[in-house]
Amino acid sequence: MITDEELVQKAIEAMSFAYAPYSNYYVGAALLTDEDEVYTGCNVENASFSPTNCAERTAVFKAVSEGKRKFKAIAIVGGKKGVMEGMFPPCGVCRQVLREFCDTDLKVLLGKPDGYMETTLGDLLPYSFSPADLK
């Protein structure tokens, strides 16, 4: 059984592997499983913008990281300089991440200046691939 102090030490060790040439903020993590296994990680920066994480995935990952696995709806809005304009449907990667945790009947609300449009994940991602396809 690993102690709290040992887990903290593992995180400190992981921090030394961080790749943070831009912010110079190094971060380490140590994740303890229910079987007393430790998984470590560190931050990895990138000069390119493409490794960016979208708002939808950030919301999903935050919820999942807090133990949430079931969802009823998601609302998505966007626009230049914080002013809502047009609709901003989720990108393909975000649709697939949503599908990992949600059924095709997930309600998706796409904000627009005069209200919103309601659709479903199934409408946005027809013929989707889900965890059930691997059984």
Image (cartoon, helix red, strand yellow):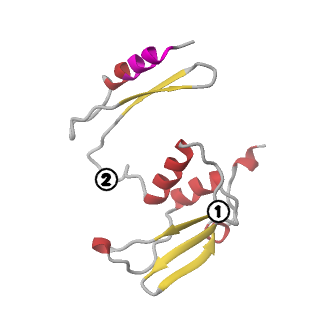
Q: Secondary structure at mark 2?
A: loop
Amino acid at the residue labelled 2: Phe
Dot 1 or dot 2: first in sequence order is 2
Which residue sits at x=50%, y=14%?
A: 3
- Between the C-alphas of marks 1 and 2, the distance is 31 Å
Rendering coords of residue 64 (x, y %): 56, 46
Q: What residue is rendered at 66% in x and 53% in y?
A: 70
Few, some or many C-alpha atoms within 10 Å of disc 1 (few <14, some 14-19, many ≥20)? Answer: few
Q: Could you tell me residue 23's position as x and y percent?
A: 21, 40
Q: Which residues are magenta?
A: 3-11
Which residue type carries mark 1? Answer: Lys
- Secondary structure under tag 1 reads loop
Q: Which label lies toward us, 1 or 2?
A: 1
Q: Nearer the viewer, residue 113 or 88?
A: 113
Which label belongs to residue 72?
1
Q: In the depicted view, which residue is nearer to us: 74 or 127?
A: 74
Q: Residue at x 29, y 49 (%)?
A: 48
Q: Quadrant of residue 14?
A: top left
In this rendering, would 88 be left or right of 95?
left
Residue annotated with mark 2: 49
Residue 126 percent across, percent down from the top left: 67, 67
Please tell me whether residue 11 is drawn above or below residue 135 in the rendered image. above
Q: Quadrant of the C terminus?
A: top right
Q: Label 2: few (<14), some or many (≥20) within 10 Å?
A: few
